[in-house]
């Protein structure tokens, strides 16, 4: 893959992409709330190889090698804004057939983008996505906040986000933990999704229960497939990589 920066609006977004297969769709990876390109490790390339797809992986604004976003508390609709950024990125890269793989926040962005831009999004894979806020979600975030204050979590994240680390962390934690965000939901977007959906959820996800999976399944009006990974938490693509790779490959091969 080649590293580059693509101008979206006035800011250069950090992107890694590999286009070697004309006529095949592009897998677009959307990282989680503390993630970045590097933290996907080799999962994107492995999936691209077995599915014969092109790949695009990018650092969302504020993360990794992309520029910082403004403000410590983001707007309540910040995930909707990021879906719009994704649309601009797909247009800039001339990607007409995208398969989105979104983890956590990235999964929520994938759901919104599929609803808003059906002409470009041909399928979505969402892992640990949220469509509303649960008490478990908030308790999980509080525990990470405690770890950030008392362990080496900050220094570990600095390897990826550099001097933006505090900003990245506080924006995530303060946004989700503020009182009005408790009533955030993207459920109204779900009936607008027109493409196939694969939902991946760890059975022991520390940030969401199977109510998230059930909510997506009941809210979407097109084929939805589920993969509940036993004894696994919030990151099946890392903690159960072989099983996740196999199930995602099957989903893609059945539709492309």
Image (cartoon, rainbow, N blue to C red):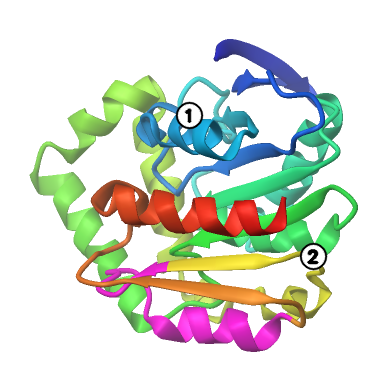
> Contact, CB < 8 Å: mark 1 with mark 2?
no
Above/below status of 32 relative to 56: below
Per the image, the residue denoted by label 2 is 115
Query: Picture quarter containing residue 162?
Result: top left
Check residue 45 in the rendering and tell me which mark sits there, or answer none.
1
In the picture, measured across the screen, residue 26 lies left or right of residue 68, that is right
Question: Residue placed at 20% from the left, 70% from the top?
Answer: 231
Residue 204 magenta: yes
Above/below status of 98 relative to 135: above
In the picture, measured across the screen, residue 79 lies left or right of residue 250, that is right
Residue reaching furthest to the left: 151
Q: In the rendering, at what x and y percent does residue 98 appear?
A: 74, 43
Given residues 35 and 69, the one toward you in this image is 35
Number of numbered markers:
2
User: Could you give the CA–CA distance between mark 1 and mark 2, rounded to whole angstroms?
Assistant: 27 Å
What secondary structure is found at the residue carrying circle 1?
Answer: helix
Query: Picture quarter containing residue 194?
Result: bottom right
- Sequence-earlier tag: 1 or 2: 1
Question: Residue placed at 57% from the left, 74% from the top?
Answer: 225
Magenta segment boundaries in residue numbering: 201-220
């Amino acid at each position: 893959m080649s590293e580059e920066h693509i101008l979206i609006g006035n800011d250069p977004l950090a992107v890694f992409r590999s286009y070697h297969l004309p006529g095949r769709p592009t897998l677009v990876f959307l990282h989680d709330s503390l993630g970045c390109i590097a933290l996907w490790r080799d999962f994107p390339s492995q999936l691209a190889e077995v599915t014969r797809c092109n790949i695009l992986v990018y650092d969302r604004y504020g993360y990794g090698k992309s520029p910082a976003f403004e403000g410590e508390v983001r707007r309540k609709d910040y995930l909707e804004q990021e879906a719009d950024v994704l649309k601009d990125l797909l247009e800039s890269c001339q990607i007409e057939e995208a398969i989105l793989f979104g983890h956590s926040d990235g999964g929520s962005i994938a759901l919104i983008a599929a609803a808003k831009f059906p002409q470009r999004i041909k399928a979505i894979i969402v892992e640990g996505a949220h469509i509303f806020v649960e008490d478990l979600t908030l308790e999980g975030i509080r525990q990470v906040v405690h770890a950030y204050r008392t362990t080496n979590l900050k220094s570990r994240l600095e390897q990826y986000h550099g001097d933006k680390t505090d900003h990245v962390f506080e924006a995530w934690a303060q946004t989700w933990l503020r009182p009005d965000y408790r009533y955030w939901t993207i459920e109204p977007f779900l009936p607008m999704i027109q493409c196939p959906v694969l939902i991946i959820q760890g059975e022991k996800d520390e940030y969401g229960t199977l109510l998230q999976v059930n909510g997506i399944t009941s809210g979407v009006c097109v084929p939805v497939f589920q993969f509940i990974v036993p004894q696994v938490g919030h990151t099946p693509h890392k903690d159960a990589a072989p099983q996740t790779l196999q199930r995602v490959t099957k989903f893609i091969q059945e539709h492309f």
